[in-house]
Image: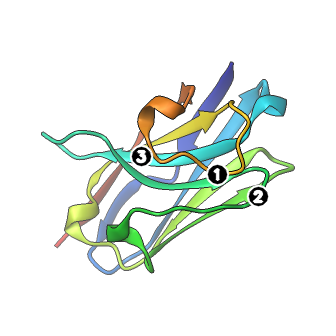
């Protein structure tokens, strides 16, 4: 199992930036990809971005392309989500997830991830 701890959430005005971090511990040798998902009040959890530990493949959901950037630090087993030009509709709890199944392509669906963090709140005011 992999333990995940997110940090970096907070309150920001529209147009501002935040950087989320997710540090993995435990069986990190079994990591193949990490992803970010978010859940807004009253809505289902949705995919945001992911990164393959092997290939560096980085899929994004359309609504964040050009504004969010996912990156990784292999040595620290940490993934980051740089969020720029934030909009009120980005308000949500952001969750980090880890995939322990071998693959060159980072997954974009919840069921493909094995471990989850506790979430960090991001609130964007208008």
Q: Is residue 118 visible?
A: no
- Mark 2 and mark 1 lie on one chain; the one further toward the N terminus is 2
Give the residue at mark 1.
105
Please report contact status of discs 3 and 1: CB closer than 8 Å, yes or no: no
CA separation in Å, label 3 and label 1 = 17 Å
Judged by depth in the image, the label closer to the viewer, 3 or 1, is: 1
Secondary structure of the residue carrying numbered label 3: strand
Q: At x 45% / y 30%, what residue is drawn?
A: 111
Asked whether 38 or 46 is in front, the reply is 46
| Left or right: where 37 falls relative to 81 | left
Quadrant (top left, top right, bottom left, bottom right) of the C terminus: bottom left
Q: SS at mark 1?
A: loop
Which residue is found at the position 69% from the left and 52% from the top? 52
Label 1 crowd (10 A; few <14 / some 14-19 / many >=20): some
**Residue under pointer 2:** 55
| Residue 12: % across, % down | 33, 67
Where residue 28 appears, as percent x and y from the top left, is 79, 32
Query: Pointer 3: residues within 10 angstroms few (<14), some, or many (20+)?
Result: many
Q: Are marks 3 and 2 in contact (CB under 8 Å)?
A: no
**Colour pattern of the rendering:** rainbow
Asked whether the beta carbons under mark 2 and mark 1 sit within 8 Å of each other, the answer is yes
Residue 56's disc number: none
Work out how far the residue at label 2 is from the one at label 1, CA to CA, in angstroms.
7 Å
Vertically, is 71 above or below 14? above
Q: Is residue 2 visible?
A: yes
Q: Residue 26: where, in percent of width, then height? A: 76, 23
Query: Which residue position holds label 3?
Result: 37
Q: Earlier in the sequence, mark 3 or mark 2?
A: 3
Residue 79: give x, y in percent of width and height: 65, 52
């Amino acid at each position: 199992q992999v333990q995940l701890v997110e940090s970096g959430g907070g309150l920001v005005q529209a147009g501002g930036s935040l950087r989320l971090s997710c540090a993995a511990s435990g069986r990190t040798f079994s990591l193949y990809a990490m992803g970010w998902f978010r859940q807004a009040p009253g809505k289902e959890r949705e995919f945001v971005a992911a990164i393959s530990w092997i290939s560096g493949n980085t899929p994004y959901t359309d609504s964040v392309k050009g504004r969010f950037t996912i990156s990784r630090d292999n040595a620290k087993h940490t993934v980051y989500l740089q969020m720029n030009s934030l909009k009120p509709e980005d308000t949500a709890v952001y969750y980090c997830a880890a995939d322990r199944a071998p693959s060159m392509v980072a997954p974009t669906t919840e069921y493909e991830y094995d471990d989850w963090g506790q979430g960090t709140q991001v609130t964007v005011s208008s």
